[in-house]
Image (tube, rainbow, N blue to C red):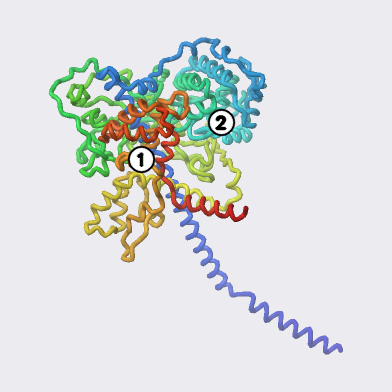
Amino acid sequence: MGCGTSVATETQVKILETDDTVKSPSPALTMKAAVLIQRWYRRYMARLEMRRRYTWNIFQSIEYAGEQDQLQLSSFFSFMLDNFTQLNGNGPDLISQLLDPVVDPWLDREICYNLIPVPESYTGPRLSFPLSVSDTNALLSAFKEQQTLHARYVLQLLYETKKLLKQMPNIIHLSTSYTNEITICGDLHGRLDDLLLIFYKNGIPSAETPYVFNGDFVDRGKKSIEVVSLLFAYLLLYPDYMHLNRGNHEDHIMNLRYGFTKEVMQKYKTHGREILQLFQDVFSLLPIATVIDGKILIVHGGISDQTDLDFLSSIERHKVKSALRFPRHSLEQLDIGHSCKRMRSTAGSRPSSHSKNQPRKTRCGHSRQDSAASTSSSSSSSSSSSSSSSFCSPRTPSCLSPRPCPSSPSMPYTINVLQVPYLDSLSSVPPPPPPPQHDREWTQVVDILWSDPKPQEGCSPNTFRGGGCYFGPDVTRRLLLRHGLQLLIRSHECKQEGYEFCHGGQVITIFSASNYYEEGSNRGAYIKVGRELVPRFYQYQVSRTTRKLTLTQRVRVAEGSALKALKEKLFTHRSELLSSLQQYDQNNSGCVSVSEWAQAFESVLRLDLPWRTLRPHLARLAPDGSVDYQSCFEDMEPGIPPAQVTPNMAETLFRYRTDIEIIFNIIDKDHSGLISIEEFRHTWRLFSAHLGVDVDDSAVDDLARSIDFNKDGSIDFTEFLEAFRVVHKLDNKEQLNGKTAGGKCS
């Protein structure tokens, strides 16, 4: 028995040895497998990073193109108000009430808010002034519970904030000698969750926790009122420890496009106008810069080679109600000639003020080719996103175009001849002499609020965003040296990690609105600076769903959203794109090479995107490897416009839907969504002049009658706009499938 047991044991040992030999690969094979896995993983992460980067580029390019459109629309408003109104005598009242609203004397009375009763049924916070800690705590708790502050308290809060800001200098000087650290936050853009998270992680504003919020408190997000109310409340409670800089979105004209005006009118239907008027005053009184220990400069946008902090300290900042409102120049001084040229507009095209090959001098001293110069084809001249900086070259109608256009904000009237409308003709008149002080004040504020850094040396107009300057490392060095500074902290640009260094570490961008473009698109961050003046960064991301998603899923969600926005952009420029592509397609085959396809897209859209990389998401390849360019528009279809709308007018409405909505919202004073037919006619004619589109008056009348659905003389503007939007076929299919599935389940 013993031998048997012994033999069995030896057999088992041999089997185990054999299994070990099979299961244990050689070290060389193991290393080879590890290298293959590592190579695959690196390629996978590289592709993911590529997708993340072009997604980011799409979001940013479309955002800046939208800002260009807003600036161009504002320049048109300004030109109309300054010139057209004075020559005609009965110009657009809606423009004047937007840009130069008459201040209601009722708002200047200290007791104005006391005349507004607060009903017993109101369950929100009841503030008493001067504010106490219990008041700010109650306000914080109420906003967490989704409550709305009563209009009376909003007006009183704004009135008290206005009184305080009037006493403040243009540039706030802080010292770290009296506190441990100062916290600096960037753009919030109406994201209340981000603000609450900052307060949770870093502490509520107090003497022990001082803050600097660097502008752009409002717009884009849905809780702008709550964000700015909390900031103003803590400013009143701790004026020595809570500091607010003005951003480019603290501007009543920007608020029309990006949501703050609409939010106020929806939440405060009765007193919304008064609240907006006070907000306009308060925004214009916000300081424009903060300096810590004489070493760190904090501004919202940036600087230019003309920035002078001593000069900025002395200006009357409240006069710049809007950085988009150009300095007024009266035409009463002009000698209007009578050698006239008949006005004529070309359908579907917009005039341009420069020849493509004509270099010009910028105010920064560099000669460059005008990036928005006209071309012989109407496709490039009519692209809204292909225009250069609207501060640099306002998009004016053909009957109102300066020749040539101003080259930069600092020289908005350095022109040789001004073509202005006089009766039914164009008159050539000499330009008025610019008032240097007013111009210089406005220009310096624009540069502070709108500029961006660039890696190249020098200073040039910010043609991509549309306003301010691009400033290089040399500009930064000179300003810091001139004023004895060592660091510039700015915001204004969304960064994927919430912050970014540039110019050799002398410039820091800080951005505090996480998930700015899409859920999971970016982190938010804030900076803490102590006595050593060494910045420390804290990152975060507000999310209810992102944590459950993998990195790949987050990239896929953001990529899908970006591509959807880009396809809408393509659809609204369909005619120009097809016209440009057909110039390469001499045989009308419907196909062009990938290179030609990319060139055509960039020449029309001017978005500076990697079109070759994006091609698989936008267009199919033909069997011969060329691009089937008609496939670019297969995933989208228009809404259902009224039958009376001509194709030319329909395309215009699709493209400039947002601009038209802004103008209609100006007319619709009570925000009921209804305007009169006469107001519609007046607005459309005004805007068609802005676009340089020749539309017959009878076509406008037919359109107005067709959208008066119940024939009561009023137009439901919301329903009208709904017809002029881009519809994604894939979305419709998903909705249809969802309804079908729902029907089966029931």
Tag of residue 60: none
In percent of the image, x 59 and y 43: which residue is there? Answer: 543
The location of residue 548, given as percent across then percent down, is: 61, 50
Mark carried by residue 183? 2
Q: Please identify the quarter of the rendering in which residue 21 is found.
A: bottom right
Q: CA distance from mark 2 to mark 1?
A: 42 Å
| Residue 645, image x, y percentages | 33, 39
* Residue depth check, mark 2 versus mark 1: number of the one nearer the observer: 1
Q: Where on the picture, by quarter, is residue 663?
A: top left
Q: Position of residue 435 (x, y in %)?
A: 28, 18
Q: Circle 2: is it few (<14), some (14-19), or many (20+) Cα within 10 Å?
A: many
Q: Mark 2: which secondary structure? A: strand
Residue 114 position (above or below residue 379): above
Kindly identify the amino acid type of the residue bearing the numbered disc 2. Thr
Q: Which residue is drawn at the image coordinates 20% and 41% (left, top)?
A: 357
Residue drawn at the location 56% of the way across and 19% of the way down: 157
Residue 452 visible, this angle: no
Answer few, some or many: residues within 10 Å of disc 1's Cα (few below 14, many 20 plus, some between 14 and 19).
Answer: many
Quadrant containing the N terminus is bottom right
Work out whether residue 36 can be spotted. yes
Q: Amino acid at mark 1?
A: Arg
Q: Residue furthest front?
A: 711
Residue 302, image quadrant? top left
Whether the residues at callouts 2 and 1 have beta carbons within 8 Å, the answer is no
Whether 587 is drawn above or below 688: the answer is below
Which residue is nearer to you in this view: 505 or 633?
633
Kind of element beneath mark 1: helix
Which of the two labelled residues, at mark 2 and mark 1, occupies the earlier sequence position?
A: 2
Which residue bears the numbered disc 1?
655
